[in-house]
Image (tube, rainbow, N blue to C red):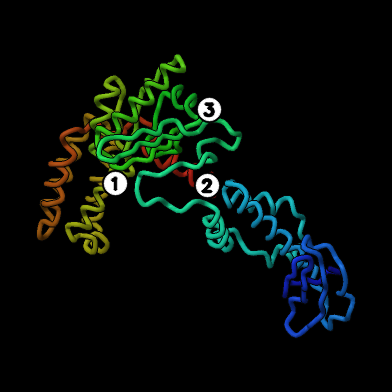
Amino acid sequence: MNQYIYKCNKKRPNKKYCVCVVKDCGVYAHTDIDQKYLSGGKADHGHPANPEFLQVKKTRDQIKHRVLNEFTPIGKIYDEEMTKNAMNPVAIAIFPTVHEMYKGAAKNRRKTIPSLPESCLFDIPNEFKLTIEKKRFLLIDEARVRRERLLLFASDAQLYLLFNASTIYMDGVPCVVGLLVNKKAATYKQIFSELKNATLRKKTVFSPSVIMTDFESGSISAVKDEFPTAQHLGCYFHFSQAIFRHIQFLGLQRQYTIDETLRVLCRKLMALPLMPRDKILSGLDEIREAADLLPGLPMIRLLEYFDKNWMLDIDLWNVYGFDSRANNICEGDDICLMK
């Protein structure tokens, strides 16, 4: 009111009693429940008005309202409201960043969402079964043995995109969102089976040429059985991550940090998937020869682990010649969409 900000100090069934937000100001105003002016607010405040704070408050209130009433990513709401509200440079300078607002906004949004169930036996609210256009989103809700449950969510547009894709990235930007109780091969096989059933209903096929996953044993087995003609590739990022985690497990992380020779050899080991298939064995032999010259032979157990866990199926992790070598290319887009 008059470029001054008031806060509600007391509320009656048909009236709000508001006071200036500046401490010890004491100027009051009365409004009805819908915040329409009734009286007050005409006395001298004794301090200057602050129109920038009004602009900030208006924009913050609009962001908060949208966060509580829609599921648009918070970062997108922030960007849209900042673009829509033409604040002056001073207001923009004092306005909190999206990172400063995100935690509080996410906390407020969680209050409007049903609490997480303690078991897989729960009812799904109808609004979560539909897209924002009120079209079907819940694809499969199936009870399995021993109180297990399989939930798959996908719109018709997402299924069309999935079934027409030649390359599939599992754990990338989801065309199908699956909520699973475990990561066993049988569970993955059921997912693929349900998707193939969906193709029959839509009179299409689900036959990707390339499938990229991480290195879970369950997904590897299921992809091999359900898509025998597809080329199955392991994510290069997860390959490198597994090698480094084993370096940590063996207690070599400190030596990896301070010993450049060891670090280079470990990185060469991580880089083997980038080499042509017919040069991997010679590349590994070169690493072994150099590792045998290191004092204390610190890489012996790491190379033993590599032989046992990775040399049985080189084709799974060899990504030479592929433009997209990791799921991260999709996961990065997913993160941007969620901001």
Q: Please report the residue visible at 65 percent of the width from the left and 51 percent of the height from the top.
A: 66
Q: Is residue 44 left or right of residue 241?
A: right
Image position, residue 246 (x, y; %)? 21, 52
Q: Is residue 177 left or right of residue 310?
A: right
Q: Which of labels 3 and 1 is toward the front?
A: 3
Question: For numbered disc 2, what is the local secondary structure?
Answer: helix
For the residues labelled 3 and 1, the Cα–Cα distance comes to 34 Å
Residue kind at label 1, given as amino acid type: Ser
For the residues labelled 3 and 2, the Cα–Cα distance comes to 19 Å
For the residues labelled 1 and 2, the Cα–Cα distance comes to 26 Å
Instruction: Tell me the residue that label 1 is attached to.
Output: 240
Instruction: Tell me the residue that label 2 is attached to.
Output: 338
Image position, residue 119 (x, y; %)? 34, 48
CB contact under 8 Å: marks 3 and 2: no
Assess disc 2: are there few (<14), some (14-19) or many (≥20) residues with their C-alpha within 10 Å of its C-alpha: few
Give residue 157's mark.
3
| Residue lying at the far top of the rendered structure | 203
Q: Please report the residue visible at 53 percent of the width from the left and 44 percent of the height from the top.
A: 337
Residue kind at label 2, given as amino acid type: Met
Q: Which of labels 1 and 2 is toward the front?
A: 2
